[in-house]
Image (cartoon, rainbow, N blue to C red):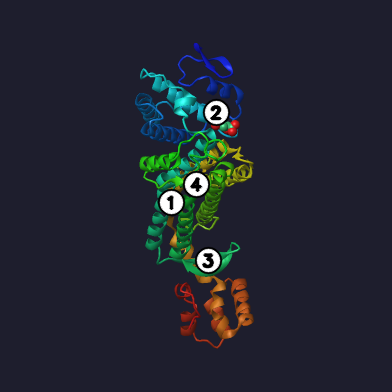
């Protein structure tokens, strides 16, 4: 491989001839061959957005001359198109402050900017008024806020709306409810699906609330939170620039000391993602049970057949989308556990597990966004209801006798249920033989559709 010599404060080393980065990035590549997973492009782009904002603020204040300011901005805009993403190869498991990734961005932007014929250095010009210690926490908030706003929230709204549409289409269908996975009182399908929709609505509310904390930025705190080397007004102006770039409302955090040394908002967001993962897991599992069979399971619904299920059993079709969704949910729950540990790693003035927080948070946002859309479009929107399989067990369901509790008492009702279950007879026939109630009254009291409406049967 052709190489060139680059220099930093520690001396010289070789980098690939065509690399846009310099010596500090190469040292990090050499030092951290850990997971071979680079930082997510959305995170790198957030760092680049901060550099773009800082260059504009520094240029406006006169700290940075116009030529260098314009050259850095041009370079940043070019990187934001994604054409240089391969020049940010540093492993997630690197220095805990993310200094290596901050310097990677500084070096690439300085290199591209210098091609404009001006002398731009990574530390003095691109990193002006900043430290990794405020840039990286800011980039975590910025990239997560963009991910929630642009990707996750629309995906959740799409899933909720798809569920609501199916619920209203299926509102005439009554089915056996289940508690402990055992037959229970009946409910309508729109009530069952309505639970999923309501869970998603509440998840969306929690993300909307978490966004308020995400939009508070560390930028301006520099090395330890005092703001050393950042001019007056820098924090507010960078937040304003980032708001204009993204359409979100960013502002400096109340305490830079807190925002450098903690990751509380990221822990909160990860917790909300874990909560969402539990919702997704519940929906996926309900779908799997309802789809089970087709002959020896519940067989209440038929999910769209997307691919042959088995390499050995011909004709078998499996619930692959709910299975994929359940695995994604499990992964998010695991990533949250690591973020929880990382959130506790604020030692004095700096949290030192920042790259892991960034990577896990963005991975979880992507997993939940893509999963929500797949569940909506390839499972919820397309499943068919097998009404005949719902009707037959509903008519025989001995638990309907619950509706007679208030008329004949729990013990008498239990005896009827037992008899009906043992004989495999409809509950109404057994109740007619064993109570003073006439057929017409029993039909009214035991009508499954009426029983879905709650209240005391009359
Ligand atoms: O990289 C920096 O700007 C600071 C570094 O993280 C440190 O505190 O040692």
Between marks 4 and 3 in the image, the one whose residue lies nearer the viewer: 4
Identify residue for label 2. Answer: 100
Identify residue for label 3. Answer: 177
Between marks 2 and 1 in the image, the one whose residue lies nearer the viewer: 2
Between marks 2 and 3 in the image, the one whose residue lies nearer the viewer: 2
* Dot 4 and dot 2 residues touching (CB under 8 Å): no
71 or 387, nearer to the observer: 71
Between marks 4 and 1 in the image, the one whose residue lies nearer the viewer: 4
Instruction: Find the distance from the CA under tag 1 to the CA under tag 3.
Output: 26 Å
Q: Secondary structure at mark 2?
A: helix
Residue 422 quadrant: bottom right
Residue 242 quadrant: top left
* Dot 2 and dot 1 residues touching (CB under 8 Å): no
Identify residue for label 1. Answer: 156
Identify residue for label 4. Answer: 253
Instruction: Find the distance from the CA under tag 4 to the CA under tag 2.
Output: 24 Å
Q: Sort mark 3 into few (<14), some (14-19) or many (20+) by Cα contacts within 10 Å.
A: some
Instruction: Find the distance from the CA under tag 2 to the CA under tag 3.
Output: 55 Å
Q: Secondary structure at mark 4?
A: loop
Q: Position of residue 345 (x, y in %)?
A: 63, 42
Q: Secondary structure at mark 1?
A: helix
């Amino acid at each position: 491989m052709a190489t060139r010599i680059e220099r930093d404060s520690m001396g010289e080393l070789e980098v690939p001839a065509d690399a846009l980065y310099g010596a500090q990035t190469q040292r990090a590549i050499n030092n951290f061959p850990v997971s071979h997973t680079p930082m997510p492009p959305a995170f790198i782009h957030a760092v680049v957005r901060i550099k773009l904002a800082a260059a504009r603020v520094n240029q406006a204040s006169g700290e940075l001359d116009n030529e260098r300011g314009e050259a850095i901005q041009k370079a940043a805009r070019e990187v934001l198109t994604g054409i240089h993403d391969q020049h940010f190869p540093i492993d997630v498991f690197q220095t805990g402050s993310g200094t290596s990734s901050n310097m990677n961005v500084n070096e690439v932007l300085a290199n591209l900017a210098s091609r404009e014929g001006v002398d731009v250095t990574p530390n003095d010009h691109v990193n002006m008024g900043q430290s990794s210690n405020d840039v990286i926490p800011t980039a975590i908030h910025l990239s997560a806020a963009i991910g929630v706003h642009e990707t996750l929230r629309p995906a959740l709204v799409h899933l909720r709306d798809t569920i609501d549409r199916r619920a209203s289409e299926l509102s005439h269908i009554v089915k056996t409810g289940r508690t402990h996975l055992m037959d229970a009182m009946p409910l309508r399908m729109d009530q069952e699906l309505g639970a999923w929709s309501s869970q998603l609505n509440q998840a969306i509310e929690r993300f909307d609330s978490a966004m308020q904390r995400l939009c508070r930025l560390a930028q301006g705190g520099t090395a330890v939170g005092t703001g050393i080397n950042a001019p007056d007004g820098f924090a507010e102006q960078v937040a304003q620039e980032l708001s204009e770039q993204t359409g979100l409302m960013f502002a400096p955090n109340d305490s830079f000391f807190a925002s450098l040394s903690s990751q509380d908002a990221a822990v909160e967001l990860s917790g909300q993602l874990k909560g969402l993962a539990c919702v997704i897991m519940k929906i996926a599992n309900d779908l799997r049970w309802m789809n089970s069979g087709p002959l020896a399971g519940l067989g209440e619904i038929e999910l769209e057949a997307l691919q042959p299920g088995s390499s050995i059993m011909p004709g078998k079709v499996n619930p692959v989308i709910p299975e994929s969704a359940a695995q994604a949910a499990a992964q998010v729950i695991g990533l949250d556990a690591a973020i929880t540990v990382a959130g506790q790693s604020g030692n004095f003035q700096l949290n030192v597990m920042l790259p892991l927080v960034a990577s896990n948070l963005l991975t979880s946002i992507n997993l939940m966004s893509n999963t929500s859309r797949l569940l909506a479009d390839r499972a919820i929107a397309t499943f068919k209801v097998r009404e005949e399989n719902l009707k037959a067990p509903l008519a025989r369901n001995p638990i309907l006798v619950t509706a007679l509790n208030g008329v004949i008492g729990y013990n008498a009702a239990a005896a009827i249920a037992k008899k009906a279950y043992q004989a495999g007879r409809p509950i109404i026939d057994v109740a007619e033989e064993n109570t003073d109630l006439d057929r017409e009254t029993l039909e009214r009291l035991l009508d499954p559709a009426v029983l879905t409406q709650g209240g005391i049967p009359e």
